[in-house]
Amino acid sequence: MIQLDYKKFLNWQNLILGFFLLIGLVGFLNFETSLALKTILILVIVGSALFTLKTNNLQYLILAILFLLIYTFYNLYFSLYWPLWLEMIFIISLTGLISFLVLNKSKENTSQSLTYTYITILSLTNLEIFLAFLPWPIDPKSKTIILLSLFYLFYNIVLLHIEKELIWKKIISYIIVVVLIITIIILTTRWYGY
């Protein structure tokens, strides 16, 4: 049974993350047509939420929220023909706010200005990757997983640097995981028009 300290859990940061999770979940369920994927996703969300409640580690919940929201943004862009500048604002704001929420919790090891520098770098990197994969003729789920994998790599390198544990062995392990995920996605995805 999970013991919950409600005063610790119900803060403004967790409420914002919960709101993002709800918006992303509604968007994903709206755009996804496969019942199996919807079921798997709900199980992953529940599992990551329980893991977050038990360990107070937001990493998996953050990745789930980013997956849901970026997938929704890709689908909104292609289905509603939103202007690109609006997508760019959403992506940079989303990445910046989530990076702020997470890095703000671990900022005792770093200065305020350095935290804002990391947030800016993560936001701009995520935006650049989003724009680079935008014209690729692949499914939005594949684009989202690739973008999320690269965000995972850069985000963990920043966390390693903040915690003063930045060593090549750990960086190489993250790079190997991300390269394997991206290779599997690229080899197994359905390329439109080919």
Image (tube, grey):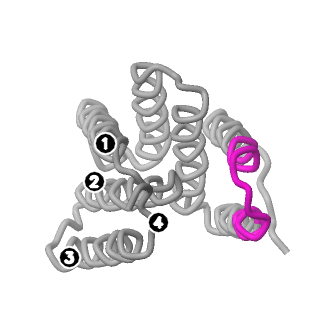
Local secondary structure at mark 4: loop
Marks 2 and 3, Cα distance to the nearest angstrom? 14 Å
Magenta range: 25-42
Residue 181 seen in the current view? yes
Identify the residue under disc 3: 172
Does residue 111 show up? no
The residue that disc 2 covers is: 158
Q: Earlier in the sequence, mark 2 or mark 4?
A: 2
Q: Main secondary structure of the magenta part?
A: helix
Q: CA distance from mark 1 to mark 4?
A: 29 Å
The answer to the question of whether label 2 and label 3 lie on touching residues, with beta carbons closer than 8 A, is: no
Q: Quick one: SS at disc 3?
A: helix
Going by the numbered disc 3, the residue's amino acid type is Ile
Please state which of the two labelled residues, at mark 2 or mark 4, is closer to the viewer.
4
Which residue position holds label 1? 122
**Which residue, given by chain and number where applicable, does mark 4 sit on?**
190
Q: Residue 172 placed where, x, y %?
A: 20, 76
